[in-house]
Image (spheres, rainbow, N blue to C red):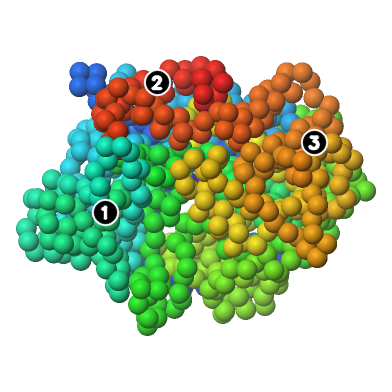
């Protein structure tokens, strides 16, 4: 979460009247950046990670864990020491940001990492220092954890201090999570309320229950006790607010049986875990990695190829098997967040004929990308070696670009229109404005697509801006399109270049794993650029992969589309020993179904991403310590892909199944969570290496 603007937020009834103003000026602001900086080049390959945490509070007497609302006090303190250090000009190696929920923290490195390979060895120690620093600002009974979905979020008595949900009023009107769990900064409750108001009902999230031997069938949740306190008028109003479907009422919709949740809430489905507010999604933690590219063309290239990898990394990083205290039949958070911020109207969702809405919109604002960008025209005349002014290393053997064969053109364009096979809505007027302003067709379509969305939070005081100096209106829409990849233009007036953000991964339980996943993606970007890799497949296949990635045990159970021949140009001689594709003569762009093991580790016909990275690293002169540290990360990824080591989701599932208190009824009790948290505390103490089944 970046900088937060301050001011008076407008309710949806007023904000919607300013939507066109924000869109119009957002596009002007983008064009101003574009025309100033499209030829910018030679930026360093800086990068940075973002780690999100939850803070839990442990009640020793009751042996119960709750989410701590006091985490916010720690955040205030952490931000204070960070800004004091900055004011004194002292180095401070972490940066602390608020997140959606009061019980969350977010930390990035204090400054982006440098572009040398040696810098990669600083990531894990930095992550460990961040965790230790956060922990040092907590109360003695509190612990900071990297858990993607806190298993008891939205269960009975899950907050410290305790608070009850109040579904009759407030920003989210949730049956399970009181608004006090939402960050009090005006942006967050306003976002919550305006999404609900724009949509015309509460958000609706249903994850399939994991059916175990003693799970009742059908699985029907009891009605939470806050519902019993409602009068009949309030109940009718709540039922209306919880009706997302118009035409075909879902199976089990409001039968009138007030003891069963689907009896009173039409959106709640039998055999599903029902969730009803933004916090269930935005209150989850993820791991994101942002890269600066040396030019806009290179950023676009990385955006496209990494978009193909994003579902694979979602499956491999899967860490969310429990929601609201029940084992789910999914392993990831993604669909939960996607539904938790789905502000589309019934007309936009195709529930009703288009009348007052402008577009049919197939996906939520939080979803996989809808359009490849291609490298685009040669705005900057290609990219040469970056400047060598990185503070973190000047040894040319260490430079990420050093193994590039200079005879291979760096700017490789393998894009074909057939890969953009999703029929996506876009704003034709904005598309034209962008093209008239000098933006090429694909990038113009990209923003004309993102800008079909309305701005959700508008601060009255920030309506009028200097479009030369500000990108506030642009960011308003851009940063509430939460897709698997984000293409980030340079902020005005800053030294930052063109960046892309890789956004699909779930947070891992330990710093070792978080470092391994981050470093793996960084090294993959280097292999993509050095070997001119071509991952393009039709986006409809990437979307199929995204759906598969979400399912339980996807790493070992699913096959994913991946391109057969991933070398855009000639196969580099250094990868001679790796699997080689035989593509059919009539389709050199053919895709095939592979397991994650095959994608990551290779087979006779596919080189594998880890062997490619290893081959890339073997052409760089690395000292022993650096090499062995990077190898430990690649080995971890490789063993998780083969199924030899479990995903975080697999590990948590196994822990529940083997717990003596688990009754094989899909219910995860207080006692199980208590023991799980003890286990997580122990494994993170030493950074996370050597945890049997998870990391060793
Ligand atoms: P978000 O858009 O997700 O709020 P932030 O601006 O907070 O992102 O930063 C995300 C990550 O980008 C951080 O890890 C930060 O270190 C990194 N970052 C910041 N500046 C650069 C840069 N010039 N190049 C690459 N990464 C950067
Ligand atoms: Mg964040
Ligand atoms: Mg981010």
State which mark lies toward you, 3 or 1. Answer: 1
* Front residue of this view, candidates 578 and 159: 578
Mark 3: is the Cβ under 8 angstroms from ligand 1? no
Residue 294 x/y as whole percent = 75, 49
Residue at the image point whose x is 75% and y is 44% from the top: 606
Q: Earlier in the sequence, mark 3 or mark 1?
A: 1
The numbered disc on residue 679 is: 2
| Element type where label 3 sits in the image | helix
Mark 1: is the Cβ under 8 angstroms from ligand 2? no
> What is the residue that sits farthest to the left in this orientation?
231
Residue 351 x/y as whole percent = 36, 73
Q: CA distance from mark 3 to mark 1?
A: 51 Å
Question: In this view of the protein, can residue 421 be seen by the observer?
Answer: yes
Tag 3 residue: 616
Tag 1 residue: 270
Residue 665 x/y as whole percent = 27, 36
């Amino acid at each position: 979460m970046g900088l937060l603007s301050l001011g008076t937020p407008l309710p949806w009834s007023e904000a919607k009247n300013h939507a066109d103003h924000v869109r119009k000026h957002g596009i002007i602001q983008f064009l101003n950046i574009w025309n100033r900086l499209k030829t910018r080049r030679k930026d360093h390959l800086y990068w940075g990670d973002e780690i999100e945490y939850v803070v839990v509070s442990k009640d020793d007497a009751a042996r119960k864990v709750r989410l701590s609302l006091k985490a916010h006090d720690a955040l205030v303190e952490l931000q204070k020491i960070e800004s004091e250090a900055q004011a004194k000009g002292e180095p401070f190696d972490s940066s602390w940001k608020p997140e959606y929920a009061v019980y969350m923290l977010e930390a990035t490195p204090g400054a982006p990492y440098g572009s040398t390979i040696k810098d990669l060895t600083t990531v894990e120690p930095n992550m460990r220092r961040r965790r230790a620093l956060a922990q040092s600002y907590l109360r003695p009974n509190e612990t900071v954890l990297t858990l993607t979905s806190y298993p008891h979020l939205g269960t009975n008595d899950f907050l410290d201090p305790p608070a009850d949900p109040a579904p009759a009023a407030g920003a989210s009107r949730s049956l399970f999570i009181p608004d006090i769990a939402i960050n009090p900064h005006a942006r967050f409750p306003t976002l919550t309320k305006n999404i609900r108001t724009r949509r015309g009902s509460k958000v609706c999230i249903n994850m399939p229950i994991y059916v175990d031997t003693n799970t009742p069938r059908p699985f029907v949740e009891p009605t939470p006790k806050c519902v019993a306190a409602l009068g009949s008028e309030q109940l009718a109003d709540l039922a209306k607010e919880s009706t997302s479907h118009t035409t075909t009422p879902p199976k089990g919709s409001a039968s009138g049986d007030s003891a069963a949740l689907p009896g009173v809430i039409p959106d709640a489905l039998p055999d599903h875990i029902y969730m009803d507010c933004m916090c269930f999604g935005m209150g989850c933690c993820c791991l994101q990695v942002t890269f600066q590219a040396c030019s806009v063309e290179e950023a676009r290239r990385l955006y496209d190829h990494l978009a193909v990898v994003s579902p694979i990394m979602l499956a491999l990083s899967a860490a969310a098997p429990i929601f609201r205290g029940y084992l789910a039949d999914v392993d990831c958070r993604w669909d939960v967040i996607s539904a938790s911020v789905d502000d589309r109207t019934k007309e936009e969702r195709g529930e009703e004929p288009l009348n007052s809405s402008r577009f049919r919109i197939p996906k939520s604002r939080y979803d996989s990308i809808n359009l490849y960008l291609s490298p685009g025209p040669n705005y900057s005349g290609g990219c040469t070696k970056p400047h060598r002014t990185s503070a973190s290393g000047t040894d040319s053997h260490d430079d990420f670009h050093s193994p590039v064969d200079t005879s291979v053109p760096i700017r490789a364009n393998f894009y074909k229109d057939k890969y953009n096979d999703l029929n996506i809505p876009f704003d034709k007027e904005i598309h034209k404005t962008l093209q008239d302003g000098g933006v090429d067709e694909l990038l113009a379509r990209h923003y004309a697509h993102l800008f079909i969305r309305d701005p959700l939070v508008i601060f009255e005081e920030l309506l009028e801006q200097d479009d030369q100096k500000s990108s506030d209106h642009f960011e308003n829409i851009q940063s509430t399109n939460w897709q698997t990849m984000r293409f980030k233009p340079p902020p005005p007036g800053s030294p930052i270049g063109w960046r892309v953000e890789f956004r699909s991964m779930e947070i891992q339980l330990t710093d070792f794993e978080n470092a391994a996943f981050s470093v793996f993606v960084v090294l993959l970007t280097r292999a993509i650029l050095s070997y001119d890799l071509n991952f393009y497949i039709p986006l409809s296949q990437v979307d199929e992969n995204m759906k598969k990635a979400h399912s339980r045990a996807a790493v070992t159970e699913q096959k994913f589309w991946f391109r057969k021949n991933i070398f855009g140009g000639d196969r580099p001689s250094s990868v001679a020993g790796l699997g080689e594709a035989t593509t059919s003569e009539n389709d050199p762009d053919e895709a095939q179904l592979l397991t994650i093991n095959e994608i990551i580790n290779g087979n006779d016909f596919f080189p594998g991403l880890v062997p490619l990275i290893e081959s890339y690293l073997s052409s760089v002169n690395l000292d022993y310590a650096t090499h062995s540290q990077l190898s430990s990360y690649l080995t971890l990824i490789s063993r998780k892909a083969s199924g030899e080591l479990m995903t975080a989701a697999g590990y948590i599932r196994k822990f529940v199944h083997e717990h003596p208190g688990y009754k094989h009824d899909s219910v995860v009790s207080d006692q199980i969570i208590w023991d799980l948290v003890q286990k997580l505390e122990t494994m993170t103490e030493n950074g996370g290496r050597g945890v049997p089944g998870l990391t060793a």
